Amino acid sequence: MKRSERQTPAPKTAGDESLESKTAPRSKTVGDAAEERALSFLQARGLTVLTRNYRCRVGEIDVVARDNDATLIFIEVRYRKTSRYGGAAASVDRRKQQRIARAASHYLQVHRINQATPCRFDVVAMGPGAANIDWITGAFEVESWS
């Protein structure tokens, strides 16, 4: 049985910081660009963005917004290069929905927002190309907030 060995990273030198920022994983940069596109799309349709990338120990919400009738909207942004395996919208499965709902519950508690406040869960599904944005309002419902 082999023991696992840890390699200690080499000490950083003066120029290492700029290299690290240039070598971000491609999927992260593509995801960030997709999220920016989605934000522009949503704001152009009248939504007010309250929070981006809300993270807590139970999950993450890409965008929290409010629409004109004061509904609080928790939005999952998904990008897929191809529609293989169902595409972007299909990737928001039951498990992901539950994580988003738990994070939304946490958001409501932390911000002291009454859970009777009208809320909905949307998905912005995207593919390559500027016109390939599908905004699914009320994409899923939550039976239990916990």
Image (cartoon, rainbow, N blue to C red):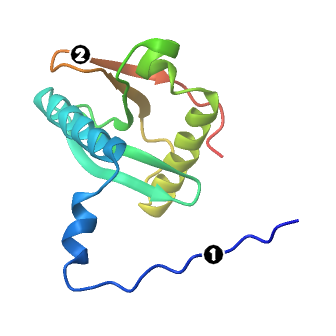
In the rendered structure, find residue 132 and report the number of the disc placed on it: 2
Q: Amino acid at mark 2?
A: Asn
User: x, y (%) of residue 144?
Assistant: 66, 37
Crowdedness of circle 2 by 10 Å Cα count: few (<14), some, many (20+)? few
Q: Quadrant of residue 70?
A: top left
Q: Amino acid at mark 1?
A: Arg
Q: Nearer the viewer, residue 124 or 14?
A: 14
User: x, y (%) of residue 60?
Assistant: 47, 49
Residue 111 position (above or below residue 130): below
Crowdedness of circle 1 by 10 Å Cα count: few (<14), some, many (20+)? few
Residue 142 lies left or right of residue 64; in this view the side is right
Label 2 sits on a secondary structure element that is loop
Q: Nearer the viewer, residue 15 or 141?
A: 15
Residue occupying the point 23% across, 45% down: 49
Residue 64 lies left or right of residue 58; in this view the side is left
Q: Nearer the viewer, residue 8 or 22?
A: 8
User: x, y (%) of residue 31?
Assistant: 31, 40
